[in-house]
Amino acid sequence: MRTALAWSHLRPTNASLPAEVQVSLRVIPQRVGGIRPAVHLESKSEDRSFTLDVSKEQARQIGRFLYTEIDIVALVKRDEDGFIETGTLTTFEPVTDDDATTAWRDWYAHNAAGWNSIEDVELELGRDRN
């Protein structure tokens, strides 16, 4: 008679299943859509392109960014060679070409323009050196 212990090596264990991990990647969407909505992506940080499951709403939104860079967060499973095998998109943000100087000036104009009227900033900050 065989015991349950003797048969346990034949059943997969949780340790043998690929772990699902969260990743953040910069990617370029190549295709989006399908009966079961998905997006096919390429990334300079991955050796192979991969496909993630998405909601219908995400598919519509990502469709506007085909062939442009976006930043994503996804839950993925990798195969034994480290390639993304399956996954689900969590969130994404388009990558903008905004110049940092322009962004800083826009922020300053909106949030700190009152400082332009101050003649002595050091004195205003209480840093009188005399």
Image (cartoon, helix red, strand yellow):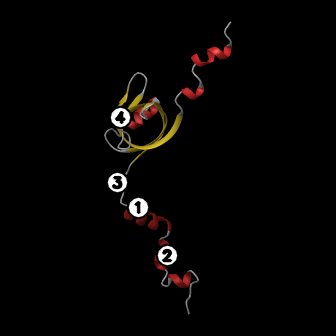
Can you tell which quarter of the image residue 97 is in? bottom left
- Three-letter code for the amino acid on which mark 3 is drawn: Asp
* Label whose residue precedes the other's in the sequence (2 or 4): 4
Mark toward the viewer: 1 or 2? 1
- Three-letter code for the amino acid on which mark 1 is drawn: Ala
Q: Mark 4: few, some, or many residues within 10 Å (few <14, many ≥20)?
A: some
Q: Mark 3: few, some, or many residues within 10 Å (few <14, many ≥20)?
A: few
Disc 2, SS: helix
Q: Which residue is mark 2?
A: 115
Disc 3, SS: loop
Q: Which residue is mark 1?
A: 103
User: Residues under labels 3 and 4: Cα distance?
Assistant: 24 Å
Q: In the orientation shown, which residue stands out farthest toward the left?
A: 67
Q: Which image quadrant: the N terminus?
A: top right
Residue 97's mark?
3
Q: CB under 8 Å between callouts 3 and 4?
A: no
Q: Which residue is mark 4?
A: 49
**Number of labelled discs?**
4
Mark toward the viewer: 3 or 4? 4
- Three-letter code for the amino acid on which mark 2 is drawn: Trp
* Label whose residue precedes the other's in the sequence (3 or 4): 4
Can you tell which quarter of the image residue 86 is in? top left
Residue 57, above or below 72: above
Residue 101, above or below 50: below
Mark toward the viewer: 3 or 2? 3
Near-viewer residue (31 or 75): 75
Near-viewer residue (106 or 77): 77
Q: CB under 8 Å between callouts 3 and 2?
A: no
In the image, is 65 to the left or to the right of 114?
left
**Place of residue 10 in the rendered image (x, y in percent of width and height, measured from the top left):** 57, 16
User: Residues under labels 3 and 2: Cα distance?
Assistant: 28 Å
Q: In the orientation shown, which residue stands out farthest toward the top?
A: 1
